[in-house]
Image (spheres, grey):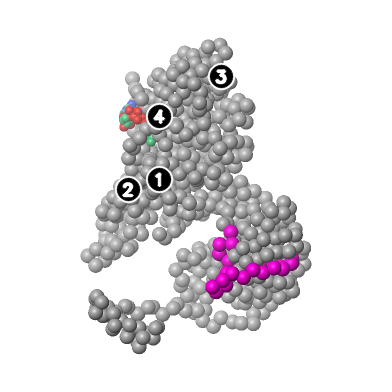
Amino acid sequence: MQITVCVAVTPSTETKVKVAPDGKSLDVAEVKFELNPYDEFALEEALRLREARGEGQVEVLTVGDGSQKEEIRKCLARGADSAAILKADTSAADSAAIAGALAARIGAGASQVVFFGKQAVDGDNSQVPAHVAVALDWPLVGKVSKLAFDGDSFTAQREIEGGVEIIEGRLPAVFSAEKGLNEPRYPSLKGIMAAKKKPLEEVEVQLEAARVTCLSLGLPPARPEGRIVGEGAAVAAEVVRLLKEEAKVI
Amino acid sequence: MEPFEGVDYMNFDSLLTEEERMIRDTAREWVSRRVAPIIEEHHRNATFPDELIPEMAELGFLGASIEGYGCPGLGGVAYGLIMQELERGDSGLRSFASVQGGLVMYPIFSYGSEEQKDRWLPPMGEGKAIGCFGLTEPDFGSHAEGMITRAEDKGDHYLLNGAKMWITNGCVADVAVVWAKIDGRVMGFLVEKGTPGYSTRRQKHKFSLRASVTSELILQDVKIPKENLLPGTENINMKGPLSCLTQARYGIAWGAIGAGMACYDAALKYGADRIQFGRPLNSFQLYQRKLAEMITEITKGQLLNLQVGRLKEAGKMHPSHVSMAKRNGCYWGLEIAREARDMLGANGITDEYVVGRHMCNLESVKTYEGTHDIHTMIIGQRVTGLSAFAN
Ligand SMILES: Cc1cc2nc3c(=O)[nH]c(=O)nc-3n(C[C@H](O)[C@H](O)[C@H](O)COP(=O)(O)OP(=O)(O)OC[C@H]3O[C@@H](n4cnc5c(N)ncnc54)[C@H](O)[C@@H]3O)c2cc1C
């Protein structure tokens, strides 16, 4: 069974965000990049599926400028069999363009299952999995928190507001992983040593022109300083009044 | 707590290969996620985190530089980086890995018979068998060669008598590498748990390396089969145990700097948040002088360790190189820990913060595997050609 995991390499969640002088992109000068945290669950689920089947190949795909190599190598160290970086200038790309490149590659191969993280923590768009599913004409189950396979059919669980939704379907299919879908493994030393010898392809691709453009990127306004109304039970009524009339939150 | 992002003042990472960085990052992340949250509790209760042994094994941290037998066969620098990260978590954890890999698997690998290697190396790498290394005795520490423990060749077996002290992992070990004399020559023997006459006693009430098991080994007419002699140690006397110490000391050099990094990181973060006289502590000149000293020594220590590691990989490392790195790492690791303890004020004496624990731990690390002064004399001997040890 061929399994594909699509990953993004994104700024570390510890990044102190600075906007570049162009006013619409991130200043990456001091940014540490790492595998998008949700993609760790996607990769782990793919590895477990392969292990449960006792056969199969897990391929990791990303679209990027080539600087993603080290993080992709880590996916191989965790246990993926091969990887490809679909190389393109992504500075102006939108989600559909990225998805187009991924879908073309997946569609041309023999993959039966595609895993994504539910969103990439840079743009937080959650769009690529849906675009890919549409392009392949495969079903998509998003934000999966539990997944089981039985032959060609699957049962997926999703957390929804106030409940749990159980979904059944058949492969081929696209899944996007919610945090907690599994406990991702660490790359073992043997895995890291073996990763060197696994294929990591770089393929030049042409991205479609973006149909949406980012106009500006800004930091949220600084929070105004708090105000101390007073102390003790006596001021409770005043606090409630302020929350109601000034802050308008209750 | 904010995650540990590493201490890299001078683009040290650019001197590492991608693979080395990846290995270091794995160890770093594992320590942050799995060790940091539980280690204080173990330190408080004086217990070793046994629950982490299978994970360390799974990741390949036990016997990481051993070639074959299911072990990863890492290069010197990658191995050192793992030790650095483990000790950033706790010296006890690094000690466990050092003893298992450097002091037990290494001599079995280097001096053992094929049967001994096949029997012990795979389960030790998998964390299913634990080892300890018995060299020090109650009356012979730095002067280990004076050991009293004896082995007698009884024809079809050896008979061991003596006592060892301060033995890391002693009580929990399935196998002990015991150094004993036959006709004045030091040789290594494998003594298995449960052998009649062989018993262990836990050494309690330590204020250092609390999250590590330290024990006495008592050997009273212990009969061991002939095939339990490490055959390669038969004719090399103290070279046997010393060669093991060189391996473990090499890891300690990295580890002690790792503990220093943890303390520097703690002091830097504390000084950013703690306001006195209306300003963060980090803004005071005296506070900055301390941070500057710490980061300078960490950087020098990293570079020294790296060079020793590269020499090790090239097969050109001399024990006196390791002495310099061990001495330097422990000295500065401990100084940094002490300074950080001071910089955290009263908070520095509680176990809510890591610095007091590292400070106490490093006192052991400075002493074991050759004290600071013993390494001073090894360096002195190398440069002068004169031995200052004795007579
Ligand atoms: C927590 C812990 C774990 C340990 N684990 C192990 C283990 O697993 N296996 C093992 O075999 N041992 C172990 N040891 C023992 C350790 O290696 C010894 O403590 C160390 O070698 C020092 O020996 P000593 O304590 O007898 O001190 P001593 O040798 O008595 O030294 C005391 C002081 O005298 C100084 N000194 C000694 N000789 C000279 C000299 N010629 N000139 C000048 N100064 C000198 C020393 O530098 C030191 O300052 C452990 C120790 C500790 C604390």
Q: Share a chain, discs 1 and 4?
A: yes
Q: Identify the subunit bearing mark 3.
A: B
Q: Is residue A73 left or right of residue B35?
A: right
Considering every residue shown, the one lying at the far bottom of the view is A245
Q: Earlier in the sequence, mark 1 or mark 3?
A: 1
Q: Is residue B385 left or right of residue B271?
A: right
Q: With respect to residue A217, does B219 lie above or below?
A: above
Magenta: main secondary structure equals: strand
Q: Element type at marker 3?
A: strand
Q: Share a chain, discs 1 and 3?
A: yes
Q: Identify the subunit bearing mark 4.
A: B
Q: With respect to residue B358, does A148 lie above or below?
A: below
Q: Looking at the picture, which amino acid does disc 4 mark?
A: Arg
In the image, the residue with mark 1 has its CB under 8 Å from the nearest atom of ligand 1 = no
Q: Looking at the picture, which amino acid does disc 2 mark?
A: Gly
- As measured in the structure, the alpha-carbon distance from the residue carrying label 3 to the one carrying label 4 is 24 Å
The residue sitting at 65% across, 66% down in the picture is A156
Query: Which mark is nearer the camera, 1 or 2?
Result: 1
Task: Locate the N terminus of chain B by quadrant.
Answer: bottom left
x and y, in percent, of residue A56 in the image: 73, 55
x and y, in percent, of residue B78 in the image: 53, 46
Q: Share a chain, discs 1 and 2?
A: yes
Q: Earlier in the sequence, mark 3 or mark 4?
A: 4
Q: What number is the disc on residue B201? A: 4
- As measured in the structure, the alpha-carbon distance from the residue carrying label 2 to the one carrying label 3 is 46 Å
Q: Earlier in the sequence, mark 1 or mark 4?
A: 1
Residue indicated by mark 3: B225
The answer to which image quadrant residue B322 occupies is top left
